[in-house]
Every structure is written in C-alpha cells, then in structure tokens.
Image (cartoon, rainbow, N blue to C red):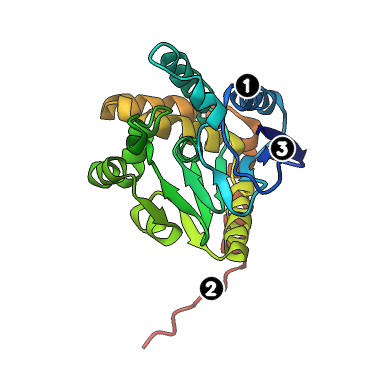
Amino acid sequence: MQTHILLKFDGDLATLTLTPDEPGKPPTLDYTALDELAGHVAAIRAADGLRAVILRSASEKYFCVGANINALKTLDAETIVPWVERGHAVFNDLAALPLPVIACVEGFCLGGGLELAMACDLIVASNTARFGQPEAALGVIAGWGGTWRLLRRVGVTRAKELFFTGKVIAADEAATIGLASFAGELAEMEAYLAAFLEGLRRCSPLAVAQMKAIVDRSDALTRDEAGRAEAEASHECMASSDTRARVAEYLESRRRRVSLAPTTKGTGS
C-alpha cells in the first residue's frame, strides 16, 4: 500500500493531503512519500502570495501512523541511518518554510506521523485525534526529530513519559500539555483554523516570517544574539514598503480618532 502526498494551491493557502491509494487504510510514510513531500515543499517555497500551509489527511480515522510496513521490512542496522537522515532532511525543510504550517489532525497520529505533525508550527486537533510515540515497543526510537521536538512542546518529563511507555493520549490531553494548540469537535477545529487564518491575514507576511525565523532559532541564541536578530529583522521590516504603509495608516487612523474625539471644557467651581 502506498501513501501519496497531494498538493493543492487555493488562493493564499497551500494544502498538503496525506492520501492512501487504498481508501480506508491509514496514511504511512516511505521514501516515495518523503520524496513527494520534499518536492511539494520546494514548490511551496517557490510560490508567490502564500500565507499558510495546511497539512491534513484524507482519512477521518488516521492522520498518519508512521512508517509503511514495507519500508520497515527493508530496515536493518545498515539501512536505518539513511532512513533517519532522509526523514530529518524533509521534515526540517517543511519546518523551515517562511510561513506558518498548521497540521490539522483527525484520528491516530503516531510515530513518524506525530513527528511530521510536530514539524509544523501548530497542531490543531479534532476530538477523535490520538497522539503517541510508540517506537520503543518495537525496540527503536523516535528518529525523525521527535526526541528534539516533543520535549520543546510538552517539557522533558512529559516527553520522557510518552517515549518510555508508548502511551497514546487523547486530543484533550494533547491540548492540555501543549502538544496541540486546540482540540474540539471537527466543526470547532475548522472554526479555530479559520479564525487563526483571519488573524494571520491581517498581519504582515514579512513580520510573521521574521518572527518565525527568530523563534525557531531561539534555543541556539543568547539573549544578546536574540537582540541583534531582532534589530536586524526590525531593520528589514521598516525598510519594506508594506510596513511603512501599515505604520502610516495606523498613525493616520489615530490622528483621525483624536481629531473627532469630543473635547471636554472645564466648568469651574
């Protein structure tokens, strides 16, 4: 069974959909799927006018359950390192896109599937979502960035609990511990996503991209280095015509509000 990753552009959105070639089967990952994802990430990076990337599954029951069983059959001590390195490279490219990437999760999101979701900036979940890193039960580890990304979302102690036990948690718990940004009914998840996109569209694409870049580097920056990064990003923003127009419009709107505000004269005593 093969899972394909389909790319669709719709206005200012790019949507990636994990699509098994057999309906009803869970999406999985192998070299073909990783290569498709890498190609789509390059196409998204080259496209103009995009504001966000949405990652979904075509299945209501499964987001992605990790490695394809046929891929697992080929892995041994000699082949595991290229497999790990390929997953890292593709997921890191997805994470490095200069615009928000949101994973919309329904159903089971396990192993490499959770690592894929965590390569996105935000995870929003329907109440059917289930999350876990069950690799230790197979005698392997989370090898596509999970050991780095999970603890940054939920903290070291909770990450260890999930890694050491292979525990699968429900959507509401995932939201409580910070793994997901939102969990609710499917319609509520879609409304949350729509509200997020509405807010995003009011903001400067350049400013969003600059803040994402700095936040994503924050673990490697000292306070002073972060300050210099903020200064450089601020310079780039203020040099843009979009930022200058936004600031001028804001100042003009304040001037108008002040000029229209009623004045209060003192009556004396």
Q: Which mark sits nearer the N-terminus, 1 or 3?
A: 3
Residue 256 percent location from the top left of the image: 63, 59
Q: Residue at x 51, y 62 (%)?
A: 127
Hey, what amino acid is under mark 3?
Answer: Asp
Q: CA distance from mark 1 to mark 3?
A: 16 Å
Q: Check the picture and name the quadrant holding the C terminus.
A: bottom left
- Residue lying farthest to the front in this orientation: 73
The reply to whether residue 86 is in sight is yes
Q: CA distance from mark 3 to mark 2?
A: 69 Å
The reply to whether residue 16 is in sight is no
Quickly name the residue at label 3.
21
Kind of element beneath mark 1: helix
Q: Eyeballing the image, is 115 above or below 33?
A: below
Q: Residue at x 36, y 39 (%)?
A: 150
Q: Which mark sits nearer the N-terminus, 3 or 2?
A: 3
Hey, what amino acid is under mark 2?
Answer: Thr
Q: Residues within 10 Å of mark 2 (few under 14, many from 20)?
A: few
Hey, what amino acid is under mark 1?
Answer: Asp
Q: Which mark sits nearer the N-terminus, 1 or 2?
A: 1
Q: Eyeballing the image, is 145 above or below 161?
A: above
Q: Which mark is residue 263?
A: 2
Residue 255 percent location from the top left of the image: 59, 56
Q: Residue at x 48, y 19 (%)?
A: 83
Q: CA distance from mark 1 to mark 2?
A: 66 Å
Q: How many marks?
A: 3
Quickly name the residue at label 1.
35
Q: Nearer the viewer, mark 3 or mark 2?
A: 3
